[in-house]
Amino acid sequence: MADTMEQTKQTTDVVVYTNGSSLPSDKEIMDSMLQMRFQHAKKQDRDYSHLFRKKSRLELIRLSMAIVGIEFLYAAETAFVTPILLGIGLSHTFMTMVWAFSPVLGFFFAPMIASFSDTIRVQWGRRRPVLLALGLAMMTGMWILPHGKTIGIFFGDPDVPVDQMEGFRWSIPVTIIGLVLTDFDAETSNGIARAYFMDMCAPDDQSRVLTTAMFIGGLGGTAGYVLGAIDWSQTNLDILGSNEATVFMFVFIVMGVGLLITLTSYREVPLPLMERDPLLRPINSNAFEAEKSRQLAVYSISKDVIPEPIKPDQDAAVGIGDDDDEKPLRLRDFVRNIVHMPKSLFILYSTQFFSQLGYLSYCLYFTDFVGSEVFGGDVAGAPGSPELALYEEGVRYGCWGMAVFAVCSASYSAVIERLVKRFSARPVYMAGLLLFSLGMLLMGLVKEKFMIFIACPTVGIMYATMYSLPYLLISQYHSKNSLIISLAIGSIIDAVETNVVVIFSASIFSLVAALIASQIVYMGL
């Protein structure tokens, strides 16, 4: 009934709009649609008017607090997972195969989970139940991950130095389970959370909420890296026996608080209600073009002109209710969509693919690179040996560098929209990737402490670019295509017997991404 009233309500009275014409501008059409839906949503048994109004910066921060916990977790993973895995006796080759588990699972199952979240019919909404489930699994994993060795000893593993470890050890599968739970659920939560942000915001706020999430996420990452840089064994807070366990305890708390704030921020419209009431659905391009066509018809009738029909944009995203036969995404459909991907999306995804290869080459091994190549330490050194002490000092020093990266990421994300408006998206996108490529090249050539603080800011610029501009271009989550690098890079390290190769590979992959980015369709940005 509401849909019929909206579509059939017509008048031949001529109204002069602020643009000086009897025909409203696109902005005026959008504003009128938002106002109509705002008033309608406010009259429901539960108030859903927040979906159709502009939100303050504080409201956007509250909405996106889950990202703080996720970035906090990423910081802990980046700083400590590689040392943890090497510390239980895994070689670089097998360790990177372990890192590959989560991306492989994500490639096949993250789209299925995202599709499932589109079809949930519970009263609590579609995104929040999935976010809650993923968050609880993630918190379980982050409790297991730093305690894998201790759990293994409980099940019968001998408590011996790394170089004496051999045969089956319980600590290895336990730690792998913890890593997969944290990494897979964190990455999947990242996408579901961003979908939730977009659902809760009016069109004008969608780019603002993404940059807000990037900014506060950068602050969360900074705090996480700073925690990793502290030697907790020298404080009274080292209550869990190791730096890793202490840091992950803080991450556990931050994740729980951030997730709780996001989940209680804004009410979702249940899917059955959204299907019954078109005025509670998000405004997509089809709805907008239909209203624009109606307005043109009214204007034309007043001028005695027969209008040409306006065709909706076929490439625009279709919202809930546009297809009554909408079904959950199946793996076969997912693969078919990849094979038949439009050229513009293929170029964008290729850019992101190589961007992720470069970034992951850096983040998976950075603290290990600093500990072994810059400080000359050895993760396999005997407990209390100078080599192990140097390695641990290098890991903490690398955390300070990554804290600088996170600060720069947060700062750059706050100004990237203005840079795009001033210079357009193409040079901003390419410059971010090229800076990272140059920074990694210099750090690989000059393995000195000072170079870490010169190169890490370029990582922050690249990271903010990589996780903001693509969302502004396609307004939907893209999956992390990190399979190839996770499977290959460890074998290369073992073959050449130095992990400086990961820094050079990061530079090369980012350079390739920048070249591909020159061909992206920027849609006027």
Image (cartoon, helix red, strand yellow):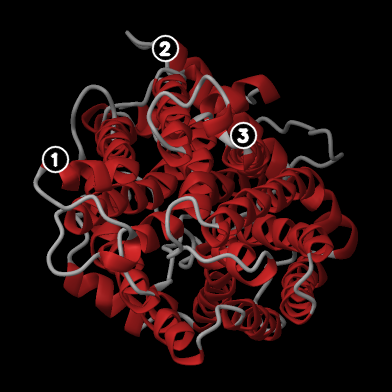
Which tag, 3 or 2, sits closer to the chain's start?
Answer: 3
Q: Is 525 located above or below residue 254 in the figure? A: below
Q: Residue 524: x percent and y percent?
A: 74, 66
Quadrant of the rendered image containing residue 486: bottom left
Query: Is 436 placed left or right of 309 in the picture?
Result: right
Residue that mark 2 sits on: 47
Query: Is 499 placed left or right of 80 in the picture?
Result: right
Does the image show residue 33? yes
Does the image show residue 10? no
Which tag, 2 or 1, sits closer to the chain's start?
Answer: 2
Instruction: Give the amino acid type for the residue marked by disc 2 in the picture.
Output: Asp
Instruction: Give the amino acid type for the residue marked by disc 3 in the picture.
Output: Thr
Which of 152 and 182 lies nearest the eye of the viewer? 152
Q: Residue 271: x percent and y percent?
A: 25, 33
Q: Residue at x 61, y 21 (%)?
A: 59
Which tag, 1 or 3, sits closer to the chain's start?
Answer: 3
Residue that mark 3 sits on: 12
Mark carried by residue 154: 1
